[in-house]
Amino acid sequence: MANLPRPTRLTPVTIAVWVLVLVAVMVGATLIGAAGLGWTRVAREVLAQLTGGTSPLSTQEAAIVWQIRVPRVVLAGLVGAALAVAGAAFQGVFRNPLADPYLLGAGAGAGMAATLVVVAAPQRGDWLVDPLPLAAFAGALGGVGLTWLIGRSAGGGPAILLLAGIAVAAFLTAVQTFAQQLNTDTIEQVYTWMLGGLATAGWHEVLLVLPYIGLSAVVLCLCARLLDVLAVGDDEAAALGIRPGRVRLVVLLAASLATAAAVAVSGLIGFVGIVVPHIMRLLAGASYRVVVPLSILGGAAFLIAADVIARTVVAPAELPIGVITAFTGAPFFILVLRTHRRGLR
Amino acid sequence: MTALALHGVGAGYDGKPVVAEVTAELETGGWLAIIGPNGAGKSTLLKAIAGLATSTGEILLDGMAAAALRSRERARRIGYAPQIPVLPEGLSVTDYVLLGRTPHLGPLAREGPTDLAIVEQVLARLDLSDLAGRELRTLSGGERQRAVLARVLAQQAGLLLLDEPTTGLDIGHAQALLDLVDRLRSEDGTTVVSTLHDLTFAAQYADRLLLLDGGRVVAAGTPAEVLTSSTVHRHYAAEVEVLRTTRGHLVVAPSRTPPLPD
C-alpha cells in the first residue's frame, strides 16, 4: 500500500527551479542591451539601487536602465506569461495539444482592429493616447466573443467552438487584408505590428496590462484541476459533478483576457502559447495543475530571452520578436506534431 | 430497499426522443442489465439515469427525485463509465483515478490525504497498484477498463452505471471484469446498472434484465423469464438456443440457419 506513486503535483523544488530560471533570465536581460553601458556597470547600478551605494552610471544612463530596459524586461515577462498560460488553457479546453491563444479569433480580431487604426490614422505620433493598443485589445475580445456567440448558437461543444473560431478568424483576416490592400502605404507599419514587438515598452504599458494578466493567471491556476477533469470528456466530467460548459466559459474568458492584454501591448507574437506549455508538459507531467503554473514562469522566461535576442542581434536595429519565437518555436512545433500524432486522430 | 426507480422515463437528445415510458425498479445491491438490439436506446437510458441526457418522467435514487439533486450531489451517488471512455494523454493511472474524487471536493479544492488513501485502496482492490505510476495509454485493454472502473469506484457512489463494460475485452478479461463488479456488489452492497450486448454474460451476472427495442421496454424480469429463444428472435432477429450449463447457468447460443447437416 505504501508504494503508491506520488500524483503529479507542483513541488516546492520545481517552483524554486523555475523561479530561479526566471530571475536569472531577468537579471541577464537587464544587464544586456544595445546602449553599450557595459554589463558590469549596469550590475553595479542595480546593486547600488538595492543597497543604497553609489552608482557608476550617469543619470541619463541610469534612466536607460530603469525607464527603458527594466520595464521592457517586465513587460516581456508579463506578455510571455499571458500567452503561455492562455495557450495551456486553450489546449485544456479543446483537448488539443496544438491549440494556441489566437485560435478563437483573438489574433485575427486584434489584427483587424489594429490594421483599421493604422489605415485610418497612419501618423499618430503626436496624439495624446495611441488608440492602437485599445483597439487591439477590443478587437481580440470582440473576435473571441463573436466566436463564442456563433459557437453557442450552433450547439456549443468544443469542436463546434473551434470551427466557429476558424470561420471568424478567416472572415476578420479577410477584412484586415482588404483594408490593408486598399492602403498599401501603411503595409510596413501593419506588418511590423503583426510580427510583434516590445519596442514601445514602458512602465505605463506594464501597469496597463498587469491587472488583466494577473487576474487571468490567478483564475487559470484555480481552474487547473477542473481542466484535468475536462480532459476525460464532457460526459464523464458532467458525471463527476462539474459543468463542462461553465468551466469552459470561465477558462476561455480568463485566457482571452490575458491574450487580449498581451496583444494590445506587443502585437501578435506566435508560438509562445504552443511551445511553452509543451515544454512544461514534457518536463513536469501532463496534469494541468503543473502545466498551468509552470507555463506562467516558463512563458515569462522564454519571452524575456527571446526579446534579448530580438533587440541585440542586429543592434541598434531590432528584429520583430515574433521572428525569434517562430524561429525557435517552429522546429519545436514540428517535433511536437511528430511525437503527438497518436493524440491527433 | 429500492435503490433506483424509473417511472415512465423518456429520454433523448436535442428534443428527439430515443427511449420512452421506461418503468423499472432495482433493489439495493441488485444488478440490472439493460439489453436490446443496436439502437434500442440502452446507452441513452443509462445516460438519462446519470443525468447526462435530458429526460422526462421520474427517476428516484434511494427514494429521492434525481432531478432535485445538485450535479455534485448526484455524482456522489452515481458513478458512470461510458462505453468508450476518454483517457487523457500523458496522465498517470493515479492522476486519472484521483479525478474520481471530484464530486467530494469543493470546486476549487484539492485532494487531501483521505482522498489519496481511498484511491490507494481502490487501486489495490482492482489489482492496479503496480500500474499506478504508468501512463494510461501504455495500458492494455483489460487494464484500461480496470482503470476506468477504479476512477468510478473512487467516487464511492452507491450506484454504478456501466455502459458496455466489456467492450473490446476478450472472454477471459470480460469475465474477470464482470466478476470484479459482482464482488463489489456482494461486498459493498453496490447497485449496478449496465448495458450488455452479450446475452450470456447478461444472463449469468445480472439478476434483472430489461429488454429494450425501439426505445421501449418489451420484456423485463429475471434472466430466465426474459431470455427465451422466441423473445430473442423477435427483437434481435437472431436464431438462438437458450441452454443451461451443467452448473445451471443460462447460455444464449447462436444457432445457424439452416441447421448443420448430420
Image (cartoon, rainbow, N blue to C red):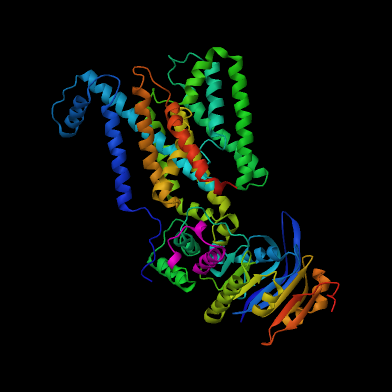
Whole-percent x and y of residue B136?
A: 50, 58
Decide if residue A211 is on the left or right side of residue A16.
right
Q: Is residue B143 magenta?
A: yes
Which quadrant of the view contains residue A64?
Answer: top left
Which quadrant of the view contains residue B47?
Answer: bottom right
Decide if residue B140 is on the left or right side of residue A70.
right
Number of marks in picture: 0
Assign the N terminus of chain A to one quadrant of the image: bottom left
Considering every residue shown, the one lying at the far top of the view is A185
Residue at horizontal 48 percent and vertical 60 percent from the top: B96
Q: Is residue A282 visible?
A: yes
Q: Is residue B119 magenta?
A: no
Residue at horizontal 13 percent and vertical 29 percent from the top: A53
Vertical placement of residue B237 versus A141, above or below: below
Whole-percent x and y of residue A324?
A: 42, 28
In front of the other: B166 or B189: B166
Vertical placement of residue B243 versus A232, above or below: below
Decide if residue B146 is on the left or right side of residue A34.
right
Considering every residue shown, the one lying at the far front of the view is B262
Decide if residue A282 is on the left or right side of residue B65.
left
Overall secondary structure of the magenta stretch? helix
Which quadrant of the view contains residue A58?
Answer: top left
- Which residue range is magenta in the image? B130-154
Whole-percent x and y of residue A166?
A: 61, 36
In front of the other: A343 or A187: A343
Q: Is residue A273 visible?
A: no
Whole-percent x and y of residue B231?
A: 81, 76
In front of the other: B236 or A257: B236
